[in-house]
Image (cartoon, grey):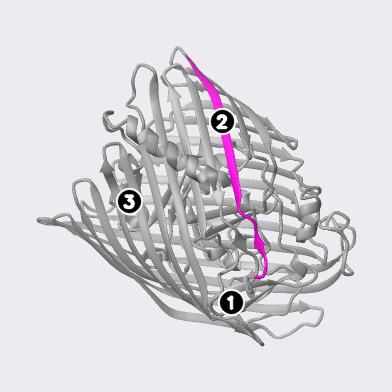
Amino acid sequence: MKFVLLTVALLATTLSFSQTVDSATNALTSIEVKTYGQVRKLKDVPAAVGYVNGQTLGRFGTASVVQAVNTVAGVRMEERSPGSYRFNIRGSSLRSPFGVRNVKVYFNDIPFTDPGGHTYLNGLGFYNFGSIEILKSPGSSLYGAGTGGVLLVESLPGNEEPSIFGEYAVGSYGLKNAYVSATTGNAENKSRIGFQHQVSDGYRQHSALKRDVFSWTGNFHLNEKQALKTTFIYSNLFYETPGALTKAEFETDPKLSRPAGGGFPSAANNGAAIYQKSFLASLSFTQQLSTSFTNQSSAYGMFTDLRNPTIRNYGKAMEPHVGGRTVFTFRHTLSPAMLSINFGGELQQNFSTSSIYQNKSSRPDSLQTEDEIRIRQSFVFLQANLSFNNWELTSGASLNGSGLRFRRAFPTPAPEQSRTLNNELTPRFAVARKFSAITLYSSISKGFSPPTSAELLPSGSAINLSLQPEQGINYDLGARGTIVKNLTLDVNAFYFRLKNTIVQRRDAGGGDYFINAGKTAQKGLETSLNYTLFQPASFFRQSFVWLNHTYHHFRYKEFKQVNADFSGNALPGVAPHTLAAGIDVLTSKGLLATITYYYSSKIPLNDANADFAGAYHLLGAKVGYEKWFRNKQRLKMVLGADNLLDQRYSLGNDINGFGGRFYNAAAGRNYYASLILQLFTQR
């Protein structure tokens, strides 16, 4: 805890000696977001929203976005092994054995989450994230089903200039990360093509990674009334999955992979890994139909080829899906008020096949099951926003429907089974009052989240079409703005009630299965502070102190399983306290330095609260030098280090792991270096 106190003391000291400095622009007062269909300053948004941009990403290395995302209060991104991501907003990882569950993700205006509820976020490389808007409550009025929140990812920053860019990074554990891109066009028409190649041996045994991502994004203003956005991504990802350790194994040697035992081979001997190829192509067309009426329509197609040898079997899945979304926006001035109405719909359909084989030393052997899965997700929505005399009122709702058709073709052909959920109404209401320096807001939203295909049809476990969708109501109360000169505040208190909570279980062979767990009550307070140290001057160009704290008090309200009563217990996988803080400095001479700190309190690992992952402190540092030549060529060199205190911790615990297999050890002290060369072509 001494590091927490040190960080707070440093912040307080900084505030005391810098009060005479004029106010400088920071993300809260300058960044524009498009949350809930309204383009506006972040400080004016009447919702709990986190934001990750280039400045946040630049505080860390380019191996992944995990550390940058974890600076956002209320959000936790985990990496069970390199490439194996898990994303949770306010505890939504209860139902996330891997990947992203219960969080809807949009990428360049199109739905990136497939109709089955899966989001292959690991198919995107570091450089595909230009900015991330994180909605921390159900986005029901505009984004349909989901209780965990929404991510809006943009790959191409609006201020990116035409250039040729190249970066090469090396680091501990065999890390090599190369990226090259070419951005062409002008402010009206812009296109970027890029390629990333990343390899790593991993910190643990059997945790190597290889990722290749080819991408092309274009933003084109065809004329004064029409604009087109194009996205193309091909991703080829491979990473080994070392498996979870028991506490004894974790404390003896955290670098171990899961050994053989209980009648199952070791993770290494059975070649446990992910082989994932994804292809995405999309178009988004915006047209101004009149002075007050616009439409944005998008369509996409995506295909994922997933192969997953595990210690118990070998899974193959082919997952093509298509979809589209249209949003009509009407704006009209009702002096002195402004009325904005958004309405439209979204439709997605997949056509998946899944086959499970016996795993024979990382090769598929005899076929065990073969399934055909068809899933449809659709919703229509309507939202109205009225602004007048510094007040803002928002009211909206979506009407959701989903359908699943399942047929087992092997070993015994069976009749088709189906599951339909229709007419789920999910409203949202928000009110905000803007003052000269601060905005106060409150909102209430209902969330509805159907079980994913992986939860209904878990690999190697029994089919469970009786699994019920989650339903929850979230209440938010927050304030955002400038409280004293140079100091901005973003604070939010929330209360979330969830029923039919879907939770993960894990059997002896590492297989996942899911059950409904009654009700939960989730309360929390999320606070972000950002302080500008110095105005741009003869020596300092930019300098910030920032601190983000999360307090989560999450409990099972009602949860009984057979003879066990877990009511009142803490929800597993959620730390009651996390804190992220740091200092950024950039000088006019091109010198840059960043110090970051992250603290997590202990985390319950099972429903009984009998086991806990210990608290840990992460300290990182990054220094660099940037040199410009004739204002057209840029050279940047960076050296960095993570986990300087060499903490032993697990970043991505297997909740309710069978036999106490909870721990996926993260890297110890490690280092990286990178070199950037950039040539601007139109300066």
Between circles 2 and 1, the one closer to the viewer is 2
295 vs 70, left or right, is left
Between circles 1 and 3, the one closer to the viewer is 1
Q: Name the residue carrying label 3.
A: 287
Is residue 615 within the magenta segment? yes
For the C terminus, which image quadrant? top left
Which dot marks residue 30?
Answer: none
- Residue kind at label 3, given as amino acid type: Gln
| Residues at discs 3 and 2 in contact (Cβ within 8 Å) | no
Q: Earlier in the sequence, mark 3 or mark 2?
A: 3
- Give the SS element for disc 3: strand
Q: Earlier in the sequence, mark 2 or mark 1?
A: 1
- Residue kind at label 2, given as amino acid type: Lys
Is residue 552 within the magenta segment? no
Real-space Cα separation, disc 2 to disc 1, in angstroms:
49 Å
Q: Is residue 331 visible?
A: yes
Real-space Cα separation, disc 1 to disc 3, in angstroms:
34 Å
The kind of secondary structure the magenta stretch mainly shows is: strand
What residue sits 66% from the left and 78% below the top? 406
Between circles 3 and 2, the one closer to the viewer is 2
- Residue 582 lies, with reference to residue 602, above or below; the image says above
Q: Which residue is the extreme one toward the top?
A: 630
Label 2: how many residues lie within 10 Å, few (<14), some (14-19) or many (20+)? many
- Please give the range of residues in magenta: 610-628
Q: Name the residue carrying label 2.
A: 622
- Residue kind at label 1, given as amino acid type: Leu
- Residue 644 lies, with reference to residue 388, above or below; the image says above
The answer to which of 349 and 236 lies nearer the viewer is 236
The answer to which of 290 and 46 lies nearer the viewer is 46
What residue sits 52% from the left and 34% below the top? 595
Q: Name the residue carrying label 1.
A: 404
